[in-house]
Structure formats: C-alpha cells, structure tokens
C-alpha cells in the first residue's frame, strides 16, 4: 500500500493503512521498488496521460514500462 510502500500482511493492516492513506504521504519509490523485488519486470500505466510511467522510469532500470490510454484499444 502506498502509505507504507509494502504489501500488507493482514486484513487489519489493510484497514489501518486505508485510514492512513487519506492523510499520509505516498511512499511511491518504496512501492515501486518493492513491486520490482517481487519479480515484476513489466509495468503498465492505464490512463489518459503517462505521468506514472515517467516516474517509474526514474526509479527502476531494465524494466519494460508502457502507458496506454485505455484497456479497450490497448
């Protein structure tokens, strides 16, 4: 979850983190690095702009990163 940058270990942790995400900072770098550590080597951003794609490119190297406007024409 973005408030911790890690994968939650329990339902209670998810609930607590969801509350914290309303007012806490986003730990984007930690989130992306932890996703990569889990073996993900292909990121896909879905949306009208590719803001997250450029942010991920600055954090991880040697990873496929794509941006598509939507899923229907992807």
Image (cartoon, rainbow, N blue to C red):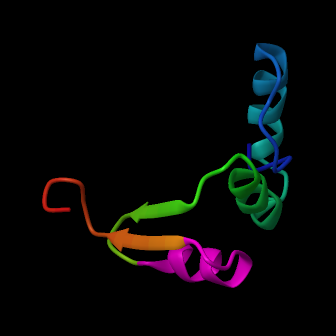
Q: Residue at x 43, y 78 (%)?
A: 50
> Could you tell me residue 6's position as x and y percent?
82, 43
Q: Is residue 42 left or right of residue 35?
A: left
Horizontal and vertical percent position of residue 5: 81, 50
Residue 74, percent across and down? 20, 62
Q: Is residue 11 magenta?
A: no
Q: Quadrant of the N terminus?
A: top right
- In the displayed structure, 53 sits above or below 70; it is below
- What kind of secondary structure does the magenta stretch mostly adopt? helix
Q: Position of residue 68 (x, y in %)?
A: 30, 69
Residue at the spot 74% in from the left edge and 50% down from the top edge: 2
Q: Quadrant of residue 7?
A: top right
Q: In terms of image quadrants, where is residue 66? A: bottom left
Q: Per the image, is 59 magenta? A: yes
Which residue shows up at 52% across the image and 76% down it?
53
Q: In the displayed structure, would residue 15 be above or below residue 19?
A: above
Q: Is residue 56 left or right of residue 1?
A: left
Image point (38%, 77%), residue name: 49
- Total marks placed: 0
Position of 32 compared to 8: left or right? left
Asked if 59 appears above or below 10 in the picture, the reply is below
What are the residue bounds of the magenta stretch?
50-63
Q: Is residue 36 above or below residue 1?
A: below
- Nearer-the-camera pick, 8 or 63: 63
């Amino acid at each position: 979850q973005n408030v911790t940058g890690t994968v939650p270990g329990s339902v209670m942790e998810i609930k607590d983190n969801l509350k914290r995400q309303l007012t806490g900072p986003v730990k984007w770098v930690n989130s992306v690095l932890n996703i990569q550590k889990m073996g993900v080597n292909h990121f896909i951003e879905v949306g009208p702009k590719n803001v997250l794609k450029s942010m991920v490119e600055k954090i991880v190297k040697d990873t496929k990163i794509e941006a598509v406007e939507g899923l229907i024409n992807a």
